[in-house]
Image: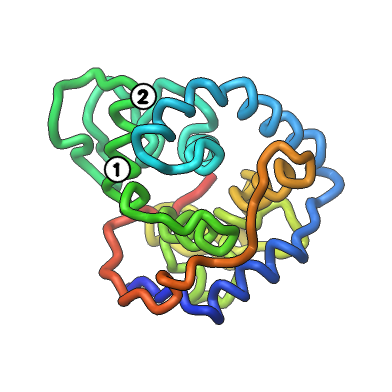
Amino acid sequence: MTVPKLTAALAKEYNDLFNRCEMAPDKMTEVEGVVERILQFQNRYAPIAAESTVPWYVIAVIHDMECGLDFTKHLHNGDSLKRRTVNVPAGRPKTGQPPFTFEVSALDALEYDGFTAWSDWSIAGICYKLEGYNGWGYRAHKINSPYLWSYSNLYTRGKYVEDNQWSGTAVSRQCGAAVILRRMSDHGTIDLVSAPSSKLTDAATLAEVPRHLFDG
């Protein structure tokens, strides 16, 4: 499908959701564990952030969503670094020879999905890029993407159980990226801003790069 623009209306939607986000009480211990592990790896993300200009915590939540914070997997989709990616997007990185380092793969993934050309790291800008990283298909089912909002009051059920295979009853068993960021923000670990960049609110609609919609 075509990628929606990050309009003022969509930015408001993301900001409102982020502000209303409440973590499920029974998931608190699990999420705190994820946050603790992310903080332990901050120095590993820092050089990638410096080269890509993508905030380290954005890289971190993608790493958790795609790889379960495993540094032996591609940031693109969690495939093994021992070979090029097999699942969508397949054949990445296109240059170099496997096995790849996590850093090389991560930089390729961020460039492939347009993160290195992005500059709006507000709450809305981050949520927009993260939702696009997984895919926009959840909007067709009129639910908030679990890739962002799972384990919160903003998501109940419905997910892609395989690439492009939808189930209205399946429930995500992985904490959403925005929920992790909200928890980190609540702790004061990161400082997120609400106001989106004005130069991006009227950005042209972009063609979506191939993405998988399956999440754990």
Q: Nearer the viewer, mark 2 or mark 1?
A: 2
Q: Residue at 44% across / 22% down in the picture?
A: 71
- Residue lying at the far right in this picture: please name it: 25
In this orientation, which residue lies closer to the viewer: 158 or 103?
A: 103
Q: Position of residue 108 (x, y in %)?
A: 27, 38
User: Label 1, on which residue?
Assistant: 87
Q: 10 Å neighbourhood of mark 1: few (<14), some, or many (≥20)?
A: some
User: Three-letter amino acid code at disc 1?
Assistant: Asn
Q: Quadrant of residue 195?
A: bottom right
Residue 190 vertical position relative to residue 149 in the rendered view, above or below: above
Q: Residue at 77% across / 61% down in the picture?
A: 153
Q: Position of residue 144 (x, y in %)?
A: 60, 67
Q: Position of residue 9 (x, y in %)?
A: 55, 81
- Residue lying at the far front in this picture: please name it: 198
Residue 93 vertical position relative to residue 173 in the rendered view, above or below: above
Q: Residue at 64% across / 27% down in the picture?
A: 39
User: Label 2, on which residue?
Assistant: 102
